[in-house]
Amino acid sequence: MINYRIVSVVLGAQLILFSCAPSRFVNTLPKGETQIGASLGGAMVNLFGLTIPTPYSSVVIGHGIRDDITLYGGLHTTALLFNTFQTDLGVTKRLYHSDSSNFWVPDLSGSFTLNTLFEMKDYAFDVFPQMDLNAVWKYGSKRSNFFYIGASNWFDLSKYKAHEELQTNAIIFNPHIGNTWQKKNWSLTLEYKVLGVMQSNQDIVVDYAKWHGNHSVPGIFVGFLKKINK
Amino acid sequence: MKNSIKISLIVILGIVVLSCQKIDSFMFENVATDEYLFDDYVGDSRILLDSSYKISEDDIHLLEFQSEGKKIYGVYTGDITKINEDTIIVYCHGNTGNIDHYWPRHKLLANVGNKNRYGILTIDYKGYGMSEGSPTEGGLVEDVDAGLEWLKSEGLTNDRLIIYGFSLGSYPATYLCSKKSGALVPSKLILEAPFASTKVMVNDASKLSMNNNYFTSTDFEVADLIKEVTQPFLLLHGEKDDFLSIKTHGEIVYKNYGGSEPNKEFIRVPTADHSDLPAEQGYEEYKNSLLEFVEK
């Protein structure tokens, strides 16, 4: 009877706050290299009979301070439309560098990110730490393309949620799989995430796609990066 | 690189300067109309009533009120000359459509006990139906209060006023019971599928304990307001409500009720979702539940 879909889609933005970008720099940049880029995508929602990714966007910049360490910062441009200054600032460390002759042994990388939100009118502020772990398989003639599997974990440090109810989602585990196609000065990434594997997707205001049963939400993301030096 | 950064900064600055968007307006799915159709309305309704529920045209009164400088409309069913002695139920409707959309629900209430046993007033908030203006969180309360002022002028007293809030309508209903700031103070509160608050909606959707202010400036803090409500309280909620979960909305509101234990009652309807509780409970049982509560 009641068409709540518009409300649902827009409120869907709330979930996208922890999933509005593909994994950042799973493969570290060479020392001194800087890349900028943008990403688009989000959780899949049902709308008017279609299942579509919520079109959340962000811009990002990353810089290799060593061959095995990349610093990055992202600004969430869709959130800006809502007067919310949302950033993700983090670092990726390559944990293991595989022998380049053996495709089957991947590189390993780990990331730590601080996701912050600041609402510029009511001065609301939240911070959510995030830790990612990825296995990266390089392939192609120059081994410039790569395929990765990993997971991002969001941590909610609050003991309580609304109305002093206990926050039971201390960790939100989101496994993902992705691929990056690298050209000389740019790259394109496509990533599929399973958001909130341990969280129920039932009886909530947003009509998320339920591809994996009654827990989790699928998400699809596209990212574009361009070298701006080196 | 300098050009890229310069352009990026300009774009970002532009977005910040131009942006002050919130989704508040999306909280209200109001439908304007030039004329109310009542029984002739053909809409997407899940409350289908047979002709035995029909209200005589003589007992249907379209009313105009003033609220915050805007003309708003309401419909009263019953004998206006008996407001000074009747018990009246004020129905605060949900966020969708207008009075026509909720007309079957209004008729159900008008048939509690027997036909027109209780006077029923439903008000279209600003921006809904024929009402002027645009809906706001605070405006909902002002609009319902405009109806209370009229009822008071017709002789209604606090002890004969019962207020019923469905979904978004739970906010003005609870507010007026809690703050006692209206022209009349309701003596009993009925909520069906209530909001706990916007923050609960956000927490449910994000799974994180984040603030609700990022996308909306509305709060609809029913779960806080209810702490100050001591009037007898009846809550009805469908266990299959996939919009406002009974667990995170209904149960929190019920738990936070400020009155004594014997004064509250929770009717859980196992098969009902957000919009079909009276039908799933069964119209007779629904009416009997309300009658028992009103007469208690």
Image (cartoon, coloured by chain):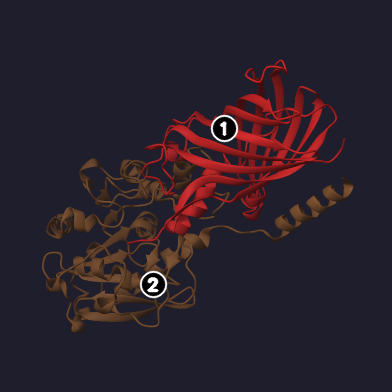
Chain colours: A red, B brown
Q: Which residue bears the numbered disc 1?
A: A177
User: Considering only vertical position in the picture, is A53 above or below A211?
Assistant: below
The residue that label 2 is drawn on is: B146
Mark nearer the viewer, 2 or 1:
1
SS at circle 2: helix
Please give the name of the residue rendered at 81% of the width and 36% of the height, measured from the top-left corner: A34
Quarter-wise, where is residue A155 in the image? top right
Compared to A104, does A120 lie above or below? Answer: below
The answer as to whether the residues below labels 2 and 1 share one chain is no
Query: Is A57 positioned to the left or the right of B207 in the image?
Result: right
Task: Name the kind of residue labelled 2 in the image.
Answer: Ala
Confirm whether residue B33 shows in the render.
yes
Per the model, the C-alpha gap separating discs 2 and 1 is 57 Å
Residue B270 lies in quadrant: top left
Q: Point out the image quarter for the C terminus of chain B.
A: bottom left
Q: Amino acid at mark 1?
A: Ile
Residue B164, horizontal then vertical, whole percent: 28, 60
Q: Chain of mark 1?
A: A
